[in-house]
Image (cartoon, rainbow, N blue to C red):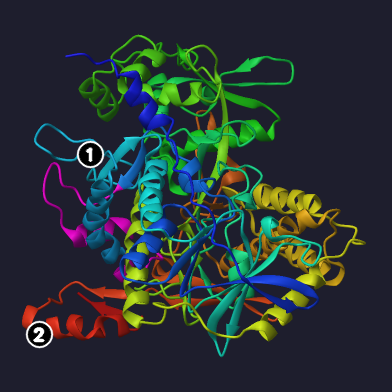
Amino acid sequence: MSTTVPQDILDALTDVAMPRLRPEPELSRTVRIGGYDIPVHACGGLVIGSGAAGLRAAVEMKRRDVDVTIISQSAWGGTSACSGSDKQTLHTANTKDHGDDFQDMAAAIGAGGAMDEDTAYIEAVGSIRAMASLQYLGLPLPQDALGGTLRYQTDHDEVGRATSCGPRTSRLMVQVLAQEAIRLDIPFFNHTTAVNVLTEDDRVVGLLAIRPKASSDANPYGLTLFTCNALVFAAGGPGELYRDSVFPNGCFGTLGLALEAGLELVNITESQFGIGTRREGFPWNLSGTYVQVIPHIYSVDDSGAEHHFLADYYRSTQEMASNIFRKGYQWPFHATRMLDFQSSLVDLAIVRENQKGRRVFMDFNRNLLPVPGDQPFSLDRLDDDVRSYLRHAGAVHDLPIDRLRHMNPLSIELYKRYKVDITIDPLEFAVNNQHMNGGIAVDIWGRTNVAGIYAVGEAAGTHGVTRPGGSALNAGQVFGTRVAEHIAASRMAHEASKLEITSLAEHALTRIEATLNTNSSRDAADIRSEVQARMSDHAGILCTPKDVSAAHKAASDLNAQIRRNGISFKRSGEVGRVLQWQQMSLASEAVLAALDHYIAKGGGSRGARAICDPNGDALPQAAHGPIPEVRFRSEREADMREQLLVHMDGEDMVVSHRKIRRFDQDARTFFERDWPAWLTGAIYDQNDGDTVPC
């Protein structure tokens, strides 16, 4: 049987073509607001974002007769469509090797702490339905000859619930969902940036957006008003928050917009950082087989000299090689894995090389150099788990590139499509920000604290400190469906909104104009440089109380300056980006406020960040002794059972605590007793109390 992948399969799984959008609806109504002629689009439900989660919400709403419209800053240009890794993961209940226990899966999803137990159970139960519906739409998940879905182990996953279509899994998800949205004839407004949410009596009534296509002499900024009775935030995470980021360029998310709308944010101290190629070229996660083939890793200084720097951290060639391999399924940095010569010592070493001004590379055409004085690299001299994995995979070739070609030819093909040939050239990489685990606080139906507003996908703060790889894709599908079910059951969005909200829009426009000041000394580029440098330099994987506190104050000062003096621009077409950076600056302050609060209250290292403290109880070791500058505090067990909430009160960021919602694992459903709640719709009225029964 041939092991060569046909070219048409390579093309289908790496060069995923997206469907063409239908023409946008014509807006026949225009209203005069604040001196501008602004077009109006009325709908029942409005979705911000065209990624996998937003499309799922829109498709499921349309199927339930909701009058839904989608707006997107850039169709098929967000994280879902443009990101991935060597075999991007979809995390679902295991249907290949054995049946799964949903409570066990829920426990794995929330094992990192600070996650609501009911949410984890919802994601576990909903995963089978999410995967099956994607397969129904045509998602090409791999199967064996008997129809079982192929599985593998991913990060924070001890069972092997991961599956994948290859490096472009999330883009393929967007493709099939987009095709369905187009088939259902859902109105879609592309190149549309949400800039202000309109509420009345603590309920959403509309949204003010900017569409360059709508610009005219009477409307130079392209302002457009959307009236709606339900609004779904699904615009992804704040990728532009960090300079060192693997997010595609232009991913702003909507956390600042949410703060201005009065929404609460949760767990925004929790992110993921890991190795990947930089966004200046082709941003991509280097998890999975890229490191499981154990390439040679080295740095280069200004003079061009190579440094085999990992040999300074590990005690033997076998230990170094085995932990490079483990970065494949322990991809995110985790503070505790810097201890005992584990895999996150690799991340620490890379960060310290970059701090020295050196560039770091992996070379797939050379085997790893040995630790000086130790035996050379050999596939026979690896830790048992690593040696067993490579042997079972059949990856026993002499060079890393041949092992990679055998295990995952798509990973080579993908870089070639972006003019990077790793069969010839080494690959530069770094430790980058990759995912925001926190976001907008929601209940078990995706509802926020403002009536009629929901959040799904990376916009929603449904994750805890850590999560199994790929569970974010599953969460977006599960909650996209649940949000649609709740909106449909409420009967509030089956028809287009008939509300008259001109006066509300005028107030919003006044606030927007206060930010726009052609005479300001600061422009969007200045704000970007300051925010990204501050977040990458002081809120990355290594944090100190002093630096975080100073960064928090500087972020607060920046927002005060923006409120006083605004942000300058040269052309009306820049206004949308100006407002996005004003909101990103708010999001940055919110993250730093929460992180500063957490550290000041004695919070320890967990997940993405090590809280470095000279009095800390944990001290990473290198090959030649301890690394005192990264001594860190351990996480407190009590913090695992709490979440940090952030909201704006006037101009202030207010941080509060909330116990996680518990889940009664001993409760049992009983068909005849519980069926009436389904029939009457009572299940949609449940609040988000401390305990939610099964």
Looking at the image, residue 490 sits to the left or right of residue 557; the answer is left
Q: Which residue does the numbered mark 1 point to in the structure image?
A: 151
Rendered image: mark on residue 668: none
Q: Residue at x 69, y 85 (%)?
A: 503
Residue at far top of view = 398
Quick one: quadrant of the N terminus? top left
Q: Position of residue 459 (x, y in %)?
A: 50, 61
Q: Residue at x 54, y 45 (%)?
A: 77
Magenta-span inclusion, residue 406: no
Residue at far bottom of view = 201
Q: Amino acid at mark 2?
A: Arg
* Pointer 1 with pointer 2, Cβ within 8 A: no
Q: Residues within 10 Å of mark 1 (few under 14, many from 20)?
A: many
Number of labels in the image equals 2
Looking at the image, residue 181 sits to the left or right of residue 1; the answer is right
Tell which circle, 1 or 2, labels the residue nearer the N-terminal end: 1
Q: Residues within 10 Å of mark 2 (few under 14, many from 20)?
A: few
Q: Using the image, determine if residue 426 lies above or below residue 488.
A: above
Q: Amino acid at mark 1?
A: Arg
Quick one: quadrant of the C terminus? bottom left
Q: Using the image, determine if residue 394 lies above or below residue 353.
A: above
Q: CA distance from mark 1 to mark 2?
A: 37 Å
Per the rendered image, the range of residues in magenta is 91-119
Q: Which residue does the numbered mark 2 point to in the structure image?
A: 673
- The residue lying toward the viewer, choosing from 403 and 198, is 198
Say what secondary structure mark 2 lies in: helix
